[in-house]
Amino acid sequence: MDPLPSNKPGVKVKCLPKFRQLYDLAAGTHTVILIGGRGGGKTYEASKFAAFSSTIRRKRIVVVRDEKEAIKESILNEILLRYDTANANGALSGSFDRLDTGIKDAKTGEMMVFTQGFRASSKEKKANLKGVSNVDIALLEEAEDIRDEAKYNTFADSIRKEGALIAIILNTPDINHWIIRRYFTLERVDITRIWPTERDDGGYYQVVPKQIPGVVVIQSNYTDNTFLAQTTVDSYRAYGDPDSFKFNKHYYLTAILGYASTGRMGQIFSGWKPITNDDFNAIEARSIFGQDFGSTSPAGLVECKIVNNRLYVRQHNYKGMTEKQIAMLYCELGLKDEIIIADSAEPLTIGRLRNGWQKSELTDTERAELEEHEKAGKTWRYAMLTRGWNIYPAIKPPGSIITGIKKLMDMEVFVTQESTDLWTEYSSYVWATDKNKMPIDEPEDANNHLIDPLRYVCTGHGRYF
């Protein structure tokens, strides 16, 4: 493999062929995406690029991960190892201080490589992105864990230095991830070409980069890495060998080859179809609402329309809310006589939303606005606060979770494209496993703040509506 010349005389960097373009990016490049399967060299080459860029090109680099607490076990160590290799003869020691937390310019004292949490840790109230604006390169590792596109946008917008670059490093996520939707198109993979006897369920896709100005995509998996030990190559191949005890179709296609799937291994639901809000609005059927509760966890709210065996769904809320905030949301959505089926584990909250608030329980501002509208003969926007809603407890006999799941499985489900949190739950809602990692007949109690309200609506069909 030929060495790649740098912009400094006498300094050369060797890298895998696919990654050479990192060192000669076109003007105007603002985003680089390193994506694919295991063993493709993404982290190794990105760490080498970071060590080179910070020391030879004097670029200031922030290493970012979902939570800062996890960074010490991440690419930072790889960057420091690449630095140590380059500094074997002490050539860099006079200019830089190698710390456990990064690399510092010995003369100015400025951190040339440092870390930052993308979101708040469990000990912090919110992420602190102070200092990120003045960086040349942001390395965002394990970006598949970052499911909130809005939070990424806030982070990206905070990097304001002219010519700054964001390098996104990730294993290929499911097709519903915002990175896939934003930067790629999908081409279905016919798995019978790999295994002629396997059933092709249409659940796997090659991700194809969109032609977006300023965005460079480098895709790789173990077949692109000539430095892998043969034992490692054999181990990866074994996952795709039906005769091997390690054979695992899903793992081989996603983690090893880097294809995108419709969801995680053990995903419960499949085949849901996207529709637009206009499509949803055009469905001539009554709306039934499903409500989960939570002030710190999401108080998921979905709107459902059922036509024969078809279920149409739109998400309305995924934020934590108090009972009063939920009531205000109902008012803003214009709910009056609609049926709402809610988590029966909170009967007091259901009672409050059913009975509403007395005038004396409203705030001074709310009471004044209500009285002002009454005097003018007009309807106050939040008038339903004093009347309450048709809200009922979900039916939860023993086995109701599985019953609800099976009812959903038997229906043709259509979900609005804008229901991003529901799509995330769809691809993340999986069967729980036993101590041997074998699936059992109950779901993991996670990723269900919108799935549960969907079940409430399905199991309430025939009793409440």
Image (cartoon, rainbow, N blue to C red):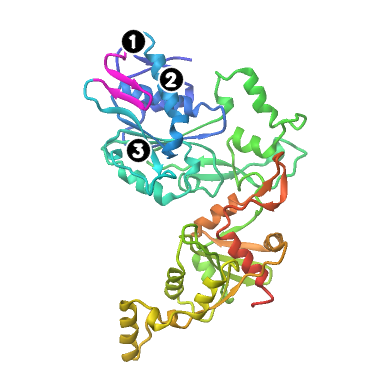
User: For residue 94: magenta?
Assistant: yes
**What is the CA distance from the residue labelled 2 to the residue labelled 1?**
14 Å
Residue 251 percent across, percent down from the top left: 65, 37
Query: What residue sits 52% from the left and 45% below the top?
Result: 185
**What is the CA distance from the residue labelled 1 to the residue labelled 3?**
33 Å
Query: What residue sits 65% from the left and 19% below the top?
Result: 231
**What is the CA distance from the residue labelled 3 to the residue labelled 2?**
26 Å
* Amino acid under disc 1: Gly
User: For residue 159: magenta?
Assistant: no
Residue hosting label 2: 81
* Amino acid under disc 3: His
Residue 33 seen in the current view: no
Location of residue 300 with respect to 329 vertically, above or below: above
Residue hosting label 1: 90
> Quarter of the image containing the C terminus?
bottom right
Q: State which region is magenta.
A: 92-106
Location of residue 277 with respect to 28 vertically, above or below: below
Left or right of residue 42: residue 155: left
Q: Reading the chain from its start, which is encountered first: label 1 or label 3?
A: 3
